[in-house]
Image (cartoon, rainbow, N blue to C red):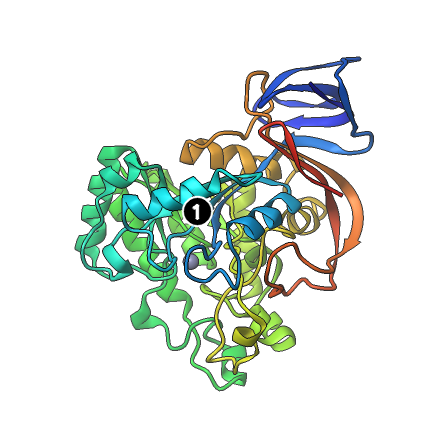
Amino acid sequence: MLLIKNGRVLDPTMGIDGVMDIVLEGETIREMGENLSGETVLDATGLVVAPGLIDTHVHFRDPGFTHKEDLHTGALAAARGGYTSVVCMANTSPVTDSPTRLGDILRRATHEDVRIYQAATVTQGLEGKALTDFAALKQAGAACFTDDGIPLTDSALVHKAMEQIAALGGVLCLHEEDPALVGSPGVNAGKVAHTLGLRGASAVSEASLIARDCMLALATGAKVVIQHISTKAGVEMVRFARSLGAKVEAEATPHHFSLTQQAVLELGTLAKMNPPLRTEEDRLAIIQGLADGTVNLIATDHAPHTPEEKAKDFSQAHSGILGLETALALGITYLVEPGHLSLGTLLEKMSTYPARFYGLQGGSLRPGAPADLVLFHPKERWTVEGFASKSTNSPYLHKTLTGRVRATICRGKVAFQL
Ligand SMILES: [Zn+2]
């Protein structure tokens, strides 16, 4: 039995926030209270003890692009960031669009120290034409369905996908950028794009697809996630759709709540991602959405790329940045410290809510729950230097942030300890 002693136990699901001990037995939380005993002791004095973080949007590039990341290095990066569960996107090579391919990843994932879930695609080969076999894929363990990275332009196809996924009780996740309205991806259409001589990706390319899909979600009753929301109008559409009763959730990434398009001028391709960083008004609208409960999922879109892919000219460079190892600190630095969210609410959006919406394990410290926990110092200042990930494409390298993960425990086992 592992005793975690004297930590500030914070569990939004039980409304607990106080100094106490927690005992883990095997892969389960056994009890919490005062003066408990256990064979192995982990001293958590000065640390917050919370449900392990859950990231519903990562790219582990496995199979197909394992020179950037693989299941093992992805798991190491997750553990270092305080994550005990991740959902990998399906834009692998081959594309994860069949039960056989899904099963292969899930089988290999069982060897890792964090829980790795896998998404399946919505369309065969990510081609946006023929739907995959949702029932068979869900049966094989698909955590959700998404063509992430490639927006679905055919409204009838999305409508049909929602009907089928709703009938199965699944989750459909959508990358919302209408390609017809994207002049060039990775930078917001506006003054920064203009400086670079690029047309940029317009805010309306996102908001218009979100509007369509919110209405389709309302019509079908499907559970839909708007991935990495980046615009003020998008947040307002989600708020409106939910007020009508649509089962729509939205993800906010740490980069969209901490940076604006200005970062492109300073950091170049390290600030290139889809959808792009937008304006300060958009950033504040996402924070407002997080604060008022419109946006309930914080997900990183962890997207490793090689230095060569990021060294290219801005228009040619790959889009995406690392996310797992800096997310909690960015949440504390940009949401908690300025007073936008309480620490408990931040943890809800990084653990409890993702678990609940996707039906994943974890997200709670309730006795009997899986022994998935994160221990972190909420006030420690640290400078981002080096990553457990195979890649290094982070705009936060050398930046000083508040809040540091000290240990991650998954299935009762220490997966990371500083
Ligand atoms: Zn995406």
Is any part of residue 220 visible from this angle? no
Q: Which residue is mark 1?
A: 250
Residue occupying image coordinates x 35% and y 37%? 141
Is any part of residue 70 visible from this angle? yes
Please tell me whether residue 161 is drawn above or below residue 307 in the rendered image: above
Foreground residue, 358 or 62?
62
Q: Extreme bottom residue here?
A: 197
**Left or right, residue 265 beside residue 385:** left
Of the four image quadrants, the one with ligand 1 is bottom left
Q: Secondary structure at mark 1?
A: strand
Residue occupying image coordinates x 20% and y 40%? 164
Q: Amino acid at mark 1?
A: Ala
- How many numbered callouts? 1
Residue occupying image coordinates x 78% and y 53%? 382
Residue 364 lies, in percent from the top left, at: 56, 26
**Left or right, residue 248 beside residue 193:** left
Q: Quadrant of the N terminus?
A: top right
Ligand 1 closer than 8 Å to label 1 CB:
no
Please tell me whether residue 112 is drawn above or below residue 302 in the rendered image: above
Please tell me whether residue 213 is drawn above or below residue 345 in the rendered image: below
Residue 62 lies, in percent from the top left, at: 45, 55
